[in-house]
Amino acid sequence: MGLFDSIKEEKITVNCSNPNCLAYNYLLQISKKDLNSKVCDCGSKLKKTTESIKVRCSNLYCSSNNLIVSIQKTDLNSEKCSHCNSKYMKTSKSNLTLDDEPYTISKELKKSKIHNHEENQEDIIVSTGSGFFVSDKGHVVTNFHVINESNSIKFVYNDNEIDAKLIASDQQLDLALLKGKIENRNYIKFSNKSPQKAQSILVAGFPFGKAISDDLKITGGIINSLKGIGNDSTRFQLDATINTGNSGGPIVDKVNGSLVGVAVEKLNKDGVKAAFGTDSENTNYGIKASQVRDFLESNNIKVSVKKDKFKVSELEEATVFVISKRNKK
């Protein structure tokens, strides 16, 4: 054995220098002497990493939520998930376990939202969701996260795209009020009654945008609980099927058609299974109609109380397809 055979090569931890590369968040070790000669499979140079931390996507709806990656500690506040553009969160293990504190689990689950259906068009991201008329003057309610950071907002009514203006929003409640230059005949009316457990409801919206069909989808179910995640009194739990694109859609009483709430969030199956060891089926949430009423009245929109007989066609004509566009960051 030669003198230098026993000297180990100094290793360093590196990652790809190109933030758009799929391997950007993955670390590997190479010999220090190879730093300037080796390149990533994408052709970009490798860079030496500093202190790294384990992270995962903070969005429980993201398909990569349970995928653990390592990033530089200094990049925690700037790096975002390559799948859904959500922020990363620190983690010390690969998955949530039953040993985690319930409060920690609840806090993470509360961040979940029904994703808008998104499509990339070069430098523009197109997001779609649902909304509904609340007056005959073109006022539409949807979720704030459907139109957040948008440069352009439209909604589709009678197969026509109507330019919409953001009138008001409440980020904490996740509500937004839009207005289009149109006079519509049908709109969702309210009830003077509070929601009840086991109350039969209908949910209307455009899950998965119009990828499946451009027809409005209506699902049925009941109210399971009068509180949301973490005992949130502004929300209620329902078992009607809700999917990506239902965000902002109306939840109405099955009998009289009055507004019960607005579709807003659901539990992620993978996140729940990792946390509790079992599957979650149709555990979804809506914003209570009382919160929507207060939001509208605080913005000088007078609500109407439902008195006439309910027809499903009214719900169909009052629900709209919302399209928002924003610049890709």
Image (spheres, rainbow, N blue to C red):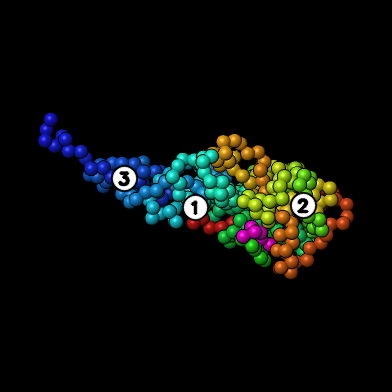
User: Which residue has dot 2 on it?
Assistant: 195
Between 213 and 34, the residue placed more toward the observer is 34
Going from the N terminus, do you reach mark 2 or mark 1 first? 1
Label 1 near label 3: C-beta < 8 Å?
no
Disc 2 versus disc 1: distance between alpha carbons?
35 Å
Determine the residue positioned at 49% across, 40% down: 95
Please indicate whether residue 38 sits to the left or right of residue 275 in the image: left
> Is 292 located above or below residue 27 in the figure?
below
Disc 3 versus disc 1: distance between alpha carbons?
23 Å
- Judged from the image, the secondary structure of the residue bearing numbered disc 3 is strand
User: Which residue has dot 3 on it?
Assistant: 13
Q: Is residue 176 magenta?
A: yes
Q: Is residue 192 magenta?
A: no
Q: In the rendering, at what x and y percent does residue 261 appear?
A: 73, 53
Q: In the rendering, at what x and y percent does residue 300 appear?
A: 74, 69
* Residue 58 appears in the rendering: yes
> Is 150 located above or below residue 128 in the figure?
below
Between 273 and 136, the residue placed more toward the observer is 273
Quadrant where the N terminus sits is top left
Q: In the rendering, at what x and y percent does residue 147 appear?
A: 62, 58
User: Which residue has dot 1 on it?
Assistant: 87
Determine the residue positioned at 56% across, 36% down: 277
Determine the residue positioned at 11% across, 33% down: 2
Disc 3 versus disc 2: distance between alpha carbons?
56 Å
**Which residues make up the magenta segment?**
172-177
Inspect the image, locate mark 1, and give the three-letter code of the amino acid beneath it: Lys
Going from the N terminus, do you reach mark 3 or mark 1 first? 3
